[in-house]
Amino acid sequence: MDPLLDLLKKNARESDAVLAKQLATTEQDIRARIAAFESEGVIRGFQAVLNTDRLESTDVRAVIELRIRPEREGGFDRIATRISKFPQVESMFLMSGGYDLLLFVKGKSLQEVANFVSARLAPLDGVLSTATHFMLKTYKDQSVLMESEPHDDRLQVCP
Amino acid sequence: MTTVSKSAHDFIAPHLRDIPKSGIRDFFDIVASRKDVISLGIGEPDFQTPWHIREKAIASIERGATRYTSNLGTPELRQALAEYTRRSFGGDYDWKSEILVTVGVSEAFDIAMRAVLSPGDEVLYHEPCFVAYAPIIRMAHGVPVAVDTFRKDDFRLTVAELEKKVTPRTRALLLNFPNNPTGATLDQADTEALADFAIRHDLLVISDEVYSELTYEGGRHSMAAIPRLRDRLILLNGFSKAWSMTGFRLGYACAPAPLTDAMMKIHQYCMMCASSISQTAGLEALKAGDADIAEMRESYHQRRNFIVASLNEMGLDCFMPRGAFYVFPSIQSTGLTSHEFAMRLLNEHSVACVPGSAFGACGAGFLRCAYATGIDQLKEAMERMATFVKSL
């Protein structure tokens, strides 16, 4: 992976000046490369990684496995695209193995997610089955541990 | 007849009593007494030991593999080390008779000195350097002879300087590249010239290459890759810097069988063997740790670029080192001594760096800044340092 993308994955809020120094280049070059990544569609956005368990929110998250019937023309893509447009769906992947689509879904309550599955997903033409698993606790997300490892306990000065 | 009984102090062997305390130690005590300090004084990786390595160590305890191992180290680890040394450094060593696993490189260096020195033997070592070398040579009843390295040579060791200090009593040449505290590395021409010098004066070479995995832009040239040096080389290396395993205390020496045997004599009586748990962890590092090194090296590389650019920007001349995780800027333009600069930076801006003079007289006028610290801390430290330099 491009080292600039690597650094942005670790901290997308890093300043252009610091990125430029780390990569031994200029700020203008950094800005141009980020703009290029954006226009090529490589960079799709910048987001904060949250520990939602620490938020005062009753939102619930669920993982849903969907089995769907591929269509003669277009395979899984048409129905998958339709499903991905629901705002409740945060992430979605086509999978190998025992089911076809893996959805990460968010709702205000258990009831809301349950309704979404029964009223929106299950009735769709081509959806063969659903299996919904509610998430209980986040340990790690986007390569970020939700609880940091112990604080730096190295000796302050050592040879 | 009256006898004056000895005080506790009098029982201490004179050659040890004469060894001064480490200059770093004093500085450490001051820093430790303060809060909110950003320390660029830490000669230790900031990365956690990679999880798969820690996990193997835990598993080895669960399995009950917690007994003495072969004095030399487990056969599996020595075989892996032979393979690794060949692959990474071009050194060819027989795992059965030429590799000894030690408690860190420090032990390896200690037993190497004790194995080869007779009282009064001189050892050439280059300064600025790691603080333990001269004391350990003295403890082995040798005479450390410092050879200066200079900013104008990017702190590489030159044969011209060595020739000034070599005598008929010189027994060995100690090398440490990539270097702590300067970050200096050797080119192939340098290693060849140093090998020729050692052969010409019939010297043993001890090469501490513990930072060898942390080299950038082709700064890695091992003394082990020079076949004509093989019979007079003790190669020292370890796991602390490459895999961020400092607390595991695991190092090793590679040397021709007679020298390995001699070191082994000391090791078996004073140490028995390196920690069995650490040896299991070390084996995992060698077998599955290439990606860890690549990731850490990339991160150090970027931080080095950042810190060198920042130091030069604030007017402190700093050469671009190609190894280890230290930069060694000159603070001569400020008119302060290394010690004054470091003390004032600590007292006025809470940033700790080690005065270059702690690493030898020719380190005066320089500062060691370790960049084995997260980029956010480095950014803050560089801002504070720039403010300080501007205020002078």
Image (cartoon, coloured by chain):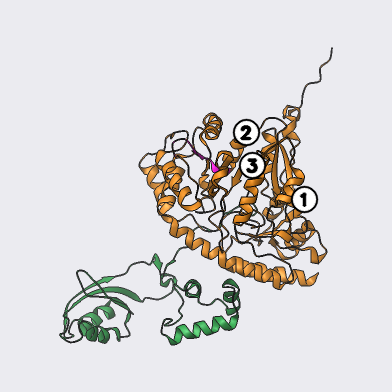
Compared to residue B131, the image places residue A47 above or below, namely below
Please give the residue where the numbered disc 3 appears in the rendered image. Answer: B199
Check the rendered structure and report the hue given to chain B: orange
**Left or right: B13, with A4 as reference point:** right
Earlier sequence position, callout 3 versus callout 2: 2
Please give the residue where the numbered disc 1 appears in the rendered image. Answer: B361
Compared to residue B161, the image places residue B268 above or below, namely above
Please give the residue where the numbered disc 2 appears in the rendered image. Answer: B116
The chain letter for the residue carrying disc 1 is: B
Check the rendered structure and report the hue given to chain A: green
SS at badge 2:
helix
Mark nearer the viewer, 1 or 3 = 3
Rendered residue at 33%/85% (across/down): A87
The chain letter for the residue carrying disc 3 is: B
The residue type indicated by label 1 comes to Ala
Q: Residues within 10 Å of mark 3 (few under 14, many from 20)?
A: some
The reply to whether residue B240 is visible in this rendering is: yes
The residue type indicated by label 2 comes to Val
Q: Nearer the viewer, residue B151 or A99?
A: B151
* Residue B121 is a magenta residue: no
What is the span of residues highlighted in magenta in the rendered image? B95-105
Rendered residue at 70%/73% (across/down): B313
Residue B82 is situated, as x and y percent measured from the top left of the image, at 45, 44
The chain letter for the residue carrying disc 2 is: B
